[in-house]
Image (cartoon, rainbow, N blue to C red):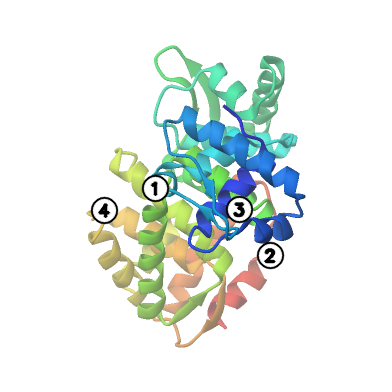
Amino acid sequence: MKIGQRNYMILKEIINNSMTVTGKELEAKLHLTRKQLEYGIAKINTYLEEQQLPILERISSGRIIVPDEVINQVNLRQLEWENQEVWFSKEERSNIIQLMLLTKQEELSLQHFIEVLKVSKNTVLSDFKRLKAELANLKIRLVYTREQGYVLKGQEYDLRQRLFAVLLHMLSGYGQYGMAAEIGEISKPQLEHIREMTEKIEREMKNRFTDEMIEVNSYFFTLILRRIRQGMVLDKVPDTFRHVAGTKEYMVIKSCLAAEDVNNIYETMYFTAHIQSMKTNSNLEAVAGQNEVYRAVEETISNFERIACVCVLKIKIIWLIYF
């Protein structure tokens, strides 16, 4: 059952402020009339009953009582997704399709894309046609087989760079965090774990990464570690990546990956070069092996440009990293 975007917002506010929320506060914050709020709570209670959960109650003081079962069992991300009321642009649909393909946990049929994008079969097929043309020069192919359904084929390195480009567009451009987490099946504890790992890297390297890049890479690293555990491991990296081996950054990343049961030398080189390509607010200490790392970073950015089909200002980014 759909409850509507406005009622989703009401329920979200109630759950997130369960100890203190009142009807008057909700009316003021969400710009609702008393009747609109009453109707919304009635609609939400119908939904909760269908989910076999206890309903919300309003008491004489104005507070709204929220049962613990509702707080613990209602999946707000899924509910947000189910009650999405906006039309996706062509670019947004392309990003969603690619993220589905790059994070798939099951066989994906045409119907999967129709249901997620909320568009017709012909629209999805048109999106596939545009995506195939876009990927034609990137050594990545969109193919369909009866055994696997729709899938992207290409070198693991190229697929990862494409995944990063998609996440960058979705999270930095559109702020679609809930959508990315839902499609990628990324949990809040997983993101928090990766953020802690990133903070450790910051401390060890005496760097400061921007909040935006920390968020994007929290999603990215979570998905890459999953790919590695599923056997999608790098068997080669660009030659310039080899220069990071033995640097201070390499040893820090090696230690962090070992804690994740990842001990592949190519993966350590890849993560090191990727971390070094992140924008920083400041650099508190000169980077060990700076010239070698510089070349690896430049290679990462060049390959990202090719896969993402965007022009990155190399000089500006490298200046931010090292100065």
In 3D space, how far apart are the residues under numbered discs 2 and 3 (Cα atoms)? 20 Å
Give whichever of 146, 293 is nearer the camera.
146
| Mark 2 and mark 4: Cα distance apart in space | 31 Å
| SS of the residue under disc 1 | helix
Q: Nearer the viewer, residue 55 or 212?
A: 55
Is any part of residue 234 visible from this angle?
no
The residue indicated by pointer 2 is: 313
**Going from the N terminus, do you reach mark 1 or mark 3 first?**
1
Residue type for callout 3: Leu
Amino acid type of the residue tagged 4 in the rendering: Asn
Say if 319 sits above or below 7 in the image: below
The residue at which mark 3 appears reads as: 171
Sequence-wise, the earlier of marks 4 and 3 is 3
Tag in front: 4 or 1: 1
Badge 2: how crowded within 10 Å, few (<14), some, or many (20+)? few
Circle 1: residue type: Asn
Residue at the (30%, 38%) spot, across then down: 230
Apparent side of residue 140 relative to residue 239 in the rendered image (left or right) = right
User: Which comes before the other along the chain, label 2 or label 4?
Assistant: 4
Horizontal side of residue 104 vs 172, given as left or right: left
| Disc 3 element | helix
- Considering the image in quadrants, where does the N terminus appear? top right
Say the numbered circle drawn on residue 121. Answer: none
Judging by the rendered image, the residue that carries numbered circle 1 is 72
